[in-house]
Image (tube, rainbow, N blue to C red):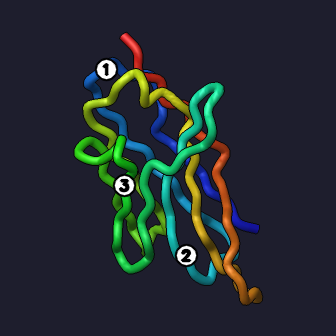
């Protein structure tokens, strides 16, 4: 069993900051990419930022210059530091990880339960 547990969401005023965390646990042999996606009401889920196991970050254009993704491989944790937040950043943010479990050959996509981020005055 693999679990991804997010934390750090909440209500923040425009221009404010939040830091999201996601911890992976379970029977994990290796983690490839970890990242963050978000889904606003009435919209499709979209990639916000991803981070490969070799240390390469990838940010959506909407996140560049404001968000930073970092990763602690030893802790199986990925972080998303979000600065200069805008009302359009309001969404449920989901953690994603591509994981190989012990006893398995292939890698599979796993998702967290989501954490709400609301940017409003």
Frontmost residue, 19 versus 40: 40
Q: In the rendered view, does 66 fall on the left or right side of 43?
A: left
Please tell me which residue is depicted at 66% across the width and 80% down the height of the picture: 100
Which residue position is annotated with label 2? Answer: 31
Task: Name the secondary structure under disc 2.
Answer: strand
User: Do the residues under discs 2 and 3 have CB atoms within 8 angstroms?
Assistant: no
Q: In the rendered view, does 33 fall on the left or right side of 2?
A: left
Q: Earlier in the sequence, mark 2 or mark 3?
A: 2
Q: Position of residue 120 (x, y in %)?
A: 40, 15
Q: Is residue 37 above or below residue 118?
A: below
Which residue position is annotated with label 1? Answer: 14
Please tell me which residue is depicted at 34% across the width and 25% down the height of the picture: 86
Give the quarter of the image for residue 50. bottom left
Task: Name the secondary structure under disc 1.
Answer: loop
Q: Is residue 92 above or below residue 101?
A: above
Give the quarter of the image for residue 71. bottom left
Which residue position is annotated with label 3? Answer: 59
């Amino acid at each position: 069993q693999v679990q991804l547990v997010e934390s750090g969401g909440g209500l923040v005023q425009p221009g404010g900051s939040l830091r999201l965390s996601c911890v992976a646990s379970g029977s994990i042999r290796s983690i490839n990419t970890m990242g963050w996606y978000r889904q606003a009401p009435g919209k499709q889920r979209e990639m916000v930022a991803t981070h490969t196991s070799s240390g390469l970050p990838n940010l959506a254009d909407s996140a560049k210059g404001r968000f930073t993704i970092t990763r602690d491989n030893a802790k199986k944790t990925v972080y998303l530091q979000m600065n200069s937040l805008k009302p359009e950043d309001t969404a449920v943010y989901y953690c994603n990880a591509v994981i190989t479990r012990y006893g398995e050959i292939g890698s599979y996509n796993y998702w967290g339960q989501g954490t709400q981020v609301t940017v409003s005055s």
